[in-house]
Amino acid sequence: MVGNRVDASAAAAYAGAQGWQATRVAYAGEAKAARKSGKPPSEPATSKTELAKSVGGLLGSFGVNVGTTLDTAAKAAPKSEDELAAEEVALGPEIAGRILGARPLWNDASAQQRVNLVGRWVASQTSRPELPWTFGVIDTPEVNAFAAPGGFILVTRGLYQLLASDSEVAAVLGHEISHCVQRDHYKVIHKQELATVGKDEAMRNVTVGNDSVAGSYARRYAEKNGAAIMLTSLDREAEYRADEAAEFYLARAGMNPLALYAVLQKLTALGSESASLAQLYKTHPPLAGRLDHIDQRGLGALETYTTRE
């Protein structure tokens, strides 16, 4: 997977050949650009209810009891941007590797190159272009896509073959890119691992890095639960936010933000009983609900870019 990775300049050259021009489009919901000052970034307080909802959304199927351990997790000291990013990048290959162990990369060099070029171009339009963005198509007829911390994204062959254009590929990747930008999976893993420590003293001594206490807990969690981290659902609001972010990333990348809507309509047309969509429905809200949410939210400032081909 890493061998197919491309850099920002190669992605920009591909974009130029397609006539895509980067466009400045403000997105209020996006994570702020990384601050690598060595000081902990300020983060909004998370209530116990919100934390339970976030952790439960991903870990409920594991039978993990998080109700009595949330206070412990809340006592952990915040990490610097450098520390957070280092742990994400360490976890990404571990988690993606678990998926690849069960479903190998599709033996189609052009498809692998395409998702890396399109994906890297879209990722360059986010607040976290510096991540080691890596994309791949796995060989399974299921219709789904997954994001692992640190910018590791996988799309199934079944979904890839439904996508008629680069903009539709970008729409799917943009949704998953948002999960990486917002650290959606990482936050759940981190909170759960801190919750399982169970001792205030351990919390006071948590540090980050490849040999750190927190890092080893997170790696052990990834080793234990493997692909399940990417195969279970996030909070519904995180998924709706990822849809919104994908539309903004499409606009920023010089494409039509309606490409995401087109993909969701195409998936809806397969029917809710389609076996190929079974896993998608486990990991994402119902397609009809996602379309309704987009309709209710409206395009707003993105309307300007809907005339693009």
Image (cartoon, helix red, strand yellow):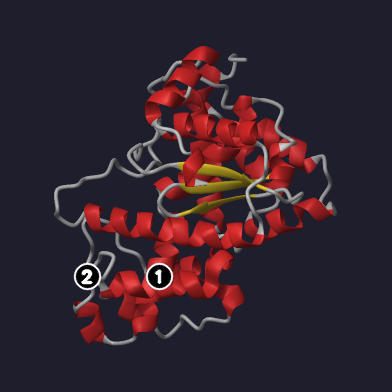
x, y percent for residue 126? 39, 35
x, y percent for residue 99? 59, 59
At x 40% / y 30%, what residue is drawn? Answer: 125
Q: Tell me the element at label 1.
A: helix
Q: Is residue 110 above or below residue 146?
A: above
Residue type beneath disc 2: Thr
In the image, 125 versus 251, the foreground residue is: 125
Which comes before the other along the chain, label 1 or label 2?
Answer: 2
Report if the CB atoms under discs 1 and 2 are less than 8 Å apart.
Answer: no
Q: Is residue 186 left or right of residue 283?
A: left
How far is disc 1 from disc 2 in space, using C-alphas?
14 Å
Q: Which residue is tagged 1? A: 219
Q: Is residue 57 left or right of residue 103?
A: left
Crowd class of label 1 (few under 14; some 14 to 19; many from 20; radius 10 Å)? many
In the image, 222 versus 192, the foreground residue is: 222
At x 38% / y 37%, what residue is drawn? Answer: 28
Residue type beneath disc 1: Arg
Number of numbered discs visible in the structure rendering:
2
Q: Which residue is tagged 2? A: 207
Quadrant in which residue 233 is drawn: bottom right
x, y percent for residue 105? 63, 48
Q: Is residue 259 left or right of residue 207?
A: right
